[in-house]
Amino acid sequence: MESLNFTIIIDGKQCKDIMSFYEEFYKKFTDWRAMIENGYLAKDGKFNGIGFNLDAMAEILYGGFGVYDEFEDRNFERVTVIFKDFNIAEENLNIDDHGLPFIYRVLYIFLLHSDHITFSLE
């Protein structure tokens, strides 16, 4: 059986601060249409009370939530995540978060899940 891969692109230009990073992440890694129906996401694209924290992000990357349900149903073996315009996000998200810049904590979480995610910066 041929191995299937799936690509997600995070747009660093959309990551102007921590909240906009989470919005970009959730739009790419979750089913945002279902989130609107369930009241987690307003129709204008603003989030309403979803877990904006790195633990929630890690759980989504671990699998079983969001778009990973589709990956598992379609037998995708690897997910490729491309972080375009990373330098812009790096500049905007160079905010102290428990002693480390927030953006580097984000990268660490992606690297922890490298068994099923191929991650690259552009």
Image (spheres, grey):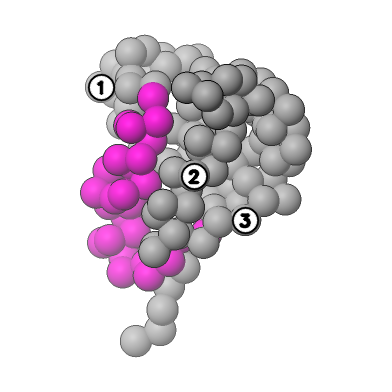
Q: Residues within 10 Å of mark 1 (few under 14, many from 20)?
A: few
Give the label, 2 or 3, closer to the camera.
Answer: 2
Q: Please, what is the three-letter code of the amino acid marked with disc 1? A: Asn
Residue 30, quarter of the rendered image: top left
**Residue plotted at (57% across, 37% down):** 104
* 90 with respect to 29 (left or right): right
Write down the region rendered in magenta. Answer: 53-80
Please indicate, yes or no, whether residue 38 appears anywhere in the rendered image: yes
Eye-nearest disc, 1 or 3: 3
Q: Residue at x 73, y 28 (%)?
A: 91
Kind of residue at disc 3: Ser
Mark number displayed over residue 38: 1
Q: Is residue 72 magenta?
A: yes
- Measure the C-alpha gap from mark 1 to mark 2: 30 Å
- Measured as percent of width and height from the top left, residue 3 is found at 41, 79
Mark 2 or 3 closer to N-term? 2
Task: Name above or below for residue 109 compared with residue 17.
Answer: below
- Residue at the limit of the structure toward the bottom, as seen here: 1
Q: Residue 107 in the image: x percent, y percent?
A: 54, 43
Residue at label 2?
Answer: 108
The spot of residue 27 in percent (x, y) is: 47, 33
- Secondary structure under tag 3 reads strand
Residue appearing at x 39%, y 25% in the figure:
53
Q: CA distance from mark 1 to mark 3?
A: 32 Å
Q: How many marks?
A: 3
Rendered location of residue 118, percent (x, y)? 51, 61
The tag on residue 120 is 3
Q: Is residue 73 left or right of residue 113?
A: left
Label 2 element class: helix
